[in-house]
Image (cartoon, coloured by chain):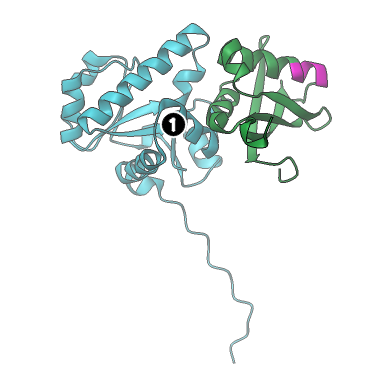
Amino acid sequence: MPDIVLVQELGTSIAGGSVVCASSLSNFFSVPNALAAKALCRKKNILLHVRSYEIDDGDMLELARAGSAFVFSFSDILSESGFRRAILLSKMRLVLAVCRKRGTGFVFVTLAKDVSSMRSARELSAFAAVLGMSDVERKTAEKKLLSLAGGSMKPKKPAPPVSTQVKK
Amino acid sequence: MKPTERFKRRYVSFSLSLSGRPPNYAEAKEIVHVHFLSFFGENGVSSLAFKLVKYDAATGKGILRCERSCTDEAIFCMACLTSWKGADCRLEPHSTSGTIRRL
């Protein structure tokens, strides 16, 4: 499963081609709130991460028109605990409902800052399911991430095996 | 009770580490039970058909049981565990199956 992390070393050493660092993506933007997000919504084909998970319907419509995607991050959940984590999950579900209503694309990634916050594909898939995404939506989100992240996320081809057969 | 009326169960294999080493059985049981209880609540755990089926303290690997429709939630719950009493803790799900033998 494709993933975006925040630290360069994680992207290169752990999973090869399918994990990329956010800093290497020119179209990835992480903003703290809806006000900061407003200025970015008209940019085309971007991945927008709003850390407060509060965004206007109109901005979401602009995102949909620009072919951009909203980013759901697993590390945002890990950084919270207890009641605050529950509120964050609730906000994520609300944003997902707005995404569906306005036809905005969305992706789910870890945005890990260290190795301990990296998660497997199965865990990310469970995260999407808990948010309320269907299997089809999960597949669409993966495709959307691959299309927006461009060539930096394509898995590297293994080196061709050296032939041991002697040509006659 | 008829088999069709019982909970439809799934078994999830996992590995548990506390500060980089596998905890003993009592510690592991406490971690798993307290974490699931805090995540699902009393009502949630009652409908989860939750049980720590097996745990090997030497390797840190174990199996837990949950209700079929709640498998994703159980795996998400496991992924949400990051620390236990100030120490780094990781509950990593590996595979899911309908029988213990297939894990």
Q: Colour of chain A?
A: cyan
Identify which residue, B80 or B4, lies in the foreground. B4
For the question of whether residue A33 can be seen, the reply is yes
SS category of the residue bearing label 1: helix
Q: Which chain is green?
A: B
Name the quadrant containing residue A26: top left
Q: Which secondary structure is most common in the magenta stretch? A: helix
- Determine the chain carrying the residue at label 1: A
For the question of whether residue A30 can be seen, the reply is no
Q: Tag 1: residue type?
A: Ala
Q: Position of residue B38 (x, y in %)?
A: 60, 11
Identify which residue, A143 or B70, lies in the foreground. B70
Magenta span covers which residues?
B24-29
Asked whether B12 falls inside the magenta stretch, the response is: no
Q: Residue at x 40, y 46 (%)?
A: A153
Name the quadrant containing residue B1: top right
Q: Is residue A133 above or below residue A85?
A: below
Q: Position of residue B25 (x, y in %)?
A: 82, 21
Q: Residue at x 69, y 19 (%)?
A: B32
Residue at numbered disc 1:
A128
Q: Is A138 left or right of B10, judged from the image as shown?
A: left
Q: Is residue B42 above or below residue B81?
A: above
